[in-house]
Structures are given as structure tokens and as C-alpha cells.
Image (tube, helix red, strand yellow):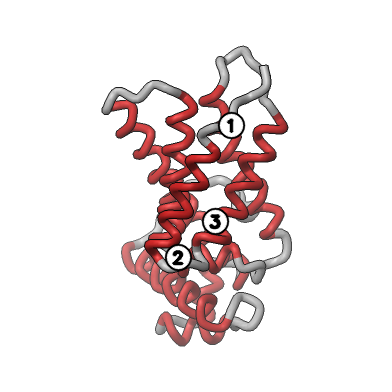
């Protein structure tokens, strides 16, 4: 959902996949170094050892590179939170509040482990419209986790959703500014507090 593209199966050769991967890796390096706004396509292709034509073969431009990096990051984050819940359930955890707490904690720990990448997306220096998408994605993620609080026939507690999604946005921005030990302590404290929230009946 990064950009509007037609959903179709596209065959990518091993060489094409390697070029695409190199371009994304280079874009991440350049964006982290000079920021998205100051980065140029020429810098990205130089770092990747690719051509401008190859970049435009795989991406529509600089913003598309940024959105693709964000999608990859989100996929890793979704897998982290999913695995945390799977592991907890396998260990016998059934309390929905505790499961949401563990998912939120896994999300924050993932942000700490990928601190440089996370900063890239939470710095405010992205393509037009990205901050709106970021809020939407965190809200959607939160909604899925808040659903653990309620039974299937219960309505969404919008106030709870807003509080939790807002807290997560602020929490991510804060933990990536701290050193590892302090960031992990803060993640523990924040998710501990979130675990005390209850939906209104």
C-alpha cells in the first residue's frame, strides 16, 4: 500500500532482483546520511553501482524507493509482533490484554534493533503524504491488536484505539533517541502501562 500500483504478478530475474536489492540498500544508506529531502537519485545509483535507467526500471523515483523501504520494514515488524503472540500462546498465554502488551513490546524492540531504519521513517523527513500513511499504518496495526481486547461481536473502542496508537507513535520516536539499555527499559515501562488499559464496556 505504499503507492498505487496495479496488482499483477511480475517476473523478476535473479539479476533484476539483485539490482533492486542493491538500489534499496543504497537508498537506505543515502537517506540515512543526508536525509530524504536532500538525497538525489544520482547519489543512490552511484552507491548502488547501478544506472539511472535501472532505478527507473524498478522504481518510479526517490519517493517510491522510500515507500518500498518502509514496506520492507513494516513486514519485518509485523513478523516480529506475530511471532511474539505465537510464542506466548504456545507457552499457554491466553489473556488478550497480555497478548496485546507482548505485541506492542515486540514492535518497540524491533524499532530499537533497527534504530537507524526506524529513525528514517519517524524523523519527519519523508515524501509528501508519508506522515499520514505512517499514522494510518500504526492505527491499523493498533486496531488489529486492540481487537484482542474484545469479543468478535463487540464494537471497536475508538478512544482506546486513539490512545494506544498515539502512545505507540510517541513511544517509537522516543525509544530510538536513547541508548540501547535505556530504550529497552522505556519500552518495558510503556508497554507495561498500555497493558493496564481496558476498553470501556
Tag 3–tag 1 contact (CB < 8 Å): no
Residue occupying the far top of the picture: 153
Tag 2–tag 3 contact (CB < 8 Å): no
Give the side of residue 3 with respect to residue 54, left or right: right
Which numbered disc flags the more N-terminal residue, 2 or 1? 2
Q: Which residue is mark 2?
A: 115
Q: Position of residue 2 (x, y in %)?
A: 60, 54
Between circles 3 and 1, the one closer to the viewer is: 1
Rendered view: 183 above or below 41: above
Disc 2 to disc 1, C-alpha distance:
27 Å
Q: Neighbour class for label 1 at 10 Å: few (<14), some, many (≥20)? A: some
Give the side of residue 181 with respect to residue 33, left or right: left
Q: Which residue is mark 3?
A: 172
Residue at figure coordinates x 43%, y 68% from the top left:
179
Residue at figure coordinates x 44%, y 47% from the top left:
188
Between circles 2 and 1, the one closer to the viewer is: 1
Residue at figure coordinates x 61%, y 40% from the top left:
164
Asked whether 156 or 36 is in front, the reply is 156
Query: Which secondary structure lies at badge 2?
Result: helix
Asked whether 48 or 101 is in front, the reply is 101
Q: Is residue 111 visible?
A: yes
Q: Position of residue 115 (x, y in %)?
A: 45, 65
Q: Which residue is mark 1?
A: 197
Give the mark count.
3
Asked whether 32 or 3 is in front, the reply is 32
Rendered view: 88 above or below 168: above
Asked whether 64 or 173 is in front, the reply is 173
Disc 2 to disc 3, C-alpha distance:
10 Å
Q: Position of residue 138 (x, y in %)?
A: 60, 46
Residue at figure coordinates x 49%, y 74% from the top left:
27
Query: Which secondary structure lies at badge 3?
Result: helix
Amino acid at each position: 500500500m505504499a503507492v498505487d500500483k496495479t496488482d499483477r504478478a511480475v517476473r523478476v530475474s535473479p539479476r533484476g532482483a539483485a539490482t533492486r536489492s542493491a538500489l534499496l540498500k543504497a537508498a537506505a544508506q543515502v537517506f540515512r546520511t543526508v536525509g530524504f529531502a536532500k538525497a538525489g537519485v544520482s547519489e543512490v545509483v552511484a552507491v548502488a553501482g547501478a544506472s539511472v535507467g535501472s532505478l527507473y526500471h524498478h522504481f518510479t523515483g526517490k519517493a517510491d524507493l522510500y515507500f518500498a523501504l518502509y514496506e520492507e520494514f513494516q513486514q519485518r515488524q509485523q513478523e516480529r509482533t506475530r511471532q511474539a503472540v505465537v510464542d506466548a500462546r504456545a507457552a499457554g498465554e491466553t489473556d488478550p490484554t497480555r497478548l496485546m502488551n507482548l505485541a506492542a513490546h515486540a514492535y518497540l524492540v524491533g524499532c530499537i534493533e533497527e534504530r537507524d531504519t526506524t529513525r528514517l521513517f519517524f524523523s519527519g523527513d519523508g515524501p509528501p503524504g508519508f506522515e499520514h500513511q505512517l499514522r494510518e499504518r500504526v492505527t491499523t496495526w493498533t486496531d488489529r491488536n486492540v481487537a484482542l481486547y474484545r469479543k468478535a461481536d463487540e464494537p471497536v473502542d475508538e478512544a482506546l484505539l486513539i490512545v494506544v496508537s498515539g502512545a505507540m507513535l510517541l513511544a517509537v520516536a522516543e525509544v530510538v533517541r536513547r541508548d540501547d539499555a535505556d530504550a529497552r527499559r522505556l519500552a518495558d515501562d510503556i508497554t507495561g502501562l498500555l497493558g493496564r488499559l481496558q476498553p470501556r464496556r
